[in-house]
Image (tube, rainbow, N blue to C red):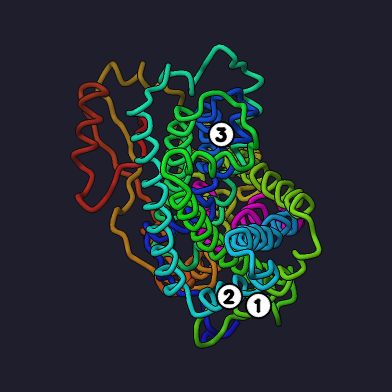
Amino acid sequence: MSATSPRLSAKLSLSSIVLFGVAYMSPAIVMLTFGVIAGASNGTTPTAYIIAAAAMSLTALSYGKMARIYPASGSAYTYARRTIDPHVGFLVGWAILLDYFFLPMVAWLIQSVYLNAQFPGVPVWVWLLINIVVTTIVNGLGIVLADRVNKTLMTLTGLGIAAFVVLCIGHLSAAPPASFTAPLWNDSTTIAAVSGGAAIAAYSFLGFDAISTLSEETVNPERNIPRGIFLAVIIGGLIFVIVSYVMQLVHPGGSFEDSSTASYAMSVLVGGKVFADIVNLVVIVGGFASAMAIQASTSRLMYVMGRDGVLPRGFFGRLNARFNTPLLNLILIGAVAMLGLGLSLDTATSFINFGAFLTFTMVNVCVVVHFVRQWRRRQRLSRRQVRRAADHRRRGRPLSVDPARPHPHSGSGSGGSSSASSTWRCSRAASGALRRRCTWRSGPSRRRRRRSASVESMKVRGLIQSSETRELTAEADDAESARALIEEQVPEGFDLVQVHNAMPRGGRVIAKALIRPAAVREIEAEGADYASARDALRAAVPADHRLLSIVVA
């Protein structure tokens, strides 16, 4: 991709991505599914939502961890591809497409069915076409416009839900419930029933992970994406628990004449038929916001897979030059959604469930793999060995500590012989980066040195290194390429200390690194005992140097 090619622009703030995640989950769904979950959990809907929220919070933490490591818009596809294997990433990408590709179709179809029920004079296919066209136009004109529309729709949805809760509380003040704890646990509650209700409630949280597909369009994604994912789950969970608790107080137990219309019957009970129709419109508004967020996230996932060559790059990996949006992907999603008229909701939903929960599983597996690799790396290499490994890869030979004491692998020296004088001791290491693990041993054993030094005085030696640092910067399409450019800039005789990635320029990763001189030298000090010799050695360290190690001379 050339430097002049259009790129995703970082425009979204933390509040924007949180609202995108909450809109994706569609907070009004708690009213639609209340009857089903209450029946399955024997009248403990809020408890079922609490359990589901706790489980989803753990997955949200996993998403946050991976989003901090890989701030790209590919979501679970990118995490599996870079953490485990490109082939695994390919399979995860296709699995997540089952979720993301069919979910817009289901969202638009459900919304069209509700609009047809509210306005029966207009056929379902007309409402479906209107929903698809309007949503595609909003998303196609840019992420900023989509953000503004989403905030407006979510505000209206929130006001509608709040009005419903207030009327329910007013109803409860006139007819107080027999128990305020019954919605959480009652006589007919069982662990199996609550678990079954929680399994259904977990579907209400599907979509919070879509925030990770907006990484390249978010300001400071390493910080905001993990926070946004977790906040979306927490905010959505609070809405679900509070609303379901109030509804369960209004209607205790899990028996309904028709569980699918329980929320409408409750709206009529607390506010009348006009209010019930208004609540239906609020649900429709929330559904439009959800469909818009779903289509936006799906198009970004397809764009990243096209950019990586998993999907045809010429079609899926292109952005509109004017609006910097994957316009072709948006149009394709809308066109495929029209096929929803020939599918049942049960068939389309089965694809969504498989893809969503497989994706959750793979993200958690990626976190485990990442931490296992980190733990093994810490076990194999100390901090000094990490610096030497980097130097070995950069120069093709190990680093000599001091001209007076060349490393045996550099062509001179004792090569690891065990004599009474100072020498290098080398052994085979498990790491592929360092072919040998080498340590500096000075003179006889520590016990013998201390015994001889106790007669006269104690002498210690220390290795010091300059603490002055320099900064390097590089810019590339992804974090790995940016780090490679940084490593190429490290001059001879310097070590790479720290690399930090940022993404302020429309998806371009800017890496900033600190380097310091690699050379170390030895200093000596003497004292009456070890403590005084050590203090004298520390006092002899120059202000612009740091002490690496102390050994008894």
Q: Position of residue 364 (x, y in %)?
A: 62, 41
Up-down: is 535 above or below 453? below
Q: Is residue 323 visible?
A: yes
Where disc 3 sits, the SS reads helix
Magenta part of the chain? 63-92
Q: Is residue 103 left or right of residue 544?
A: right
Find disc 1 in the rendering and name its residue.
Answer: 331
Disc 3 residue crowd, few under 14, some 14–19, many 20+, Cα 10 Å: many
Q: Main secondary structure of the magenta part?
A: helix
Which element carries disc 1, helix, strand or loop? helix
Q: Residues within 10 Å of mark 1 (few under 14, many from 20)?
A: some
Residue at 42% x, 46% y: name it: 231
Query: Which image quarter is the C terminus in?
Result: top left
Residue 52 badge: 3
For the point 67% across and 61% down, the residue is 109
Q: In the rendered structure, which disc, 3 or 1, sits on the residue that comes first in sequence?
A: 3
Q: From the top left corner, tell me how far across and down residue 69 is, in percent.
A: 51, 53
Residue 300 badge: none
- Side of 175 relative to 425 (left or right): left
Image quadrant where one finds the N terminus = bottom right
The Cα atoms of the two marked residues, 2 and 1, are separated by 7 Å
Q: Is residue 405 visible?
A: no
Q: Pointer 2: what residue?
A: 136
Horizontal side of 514 relative to 41 (left or right) equals: left
Q: Position of residue 399 (x, y in %)?
A: 50, 54
Residue 447 versus residue 230: which sits nearer the camera?
230
Q: Amino acid at mark 3?
A: Ala
User: What's under tag 1, amino acid-wise?
Assistant: Ile
**Under tag 2, what secondary structure?**
helix
Kindly identify the residue that appears in the image at 59 percent across and 37 percent down. 201
Give amino acid for label 2: Thr
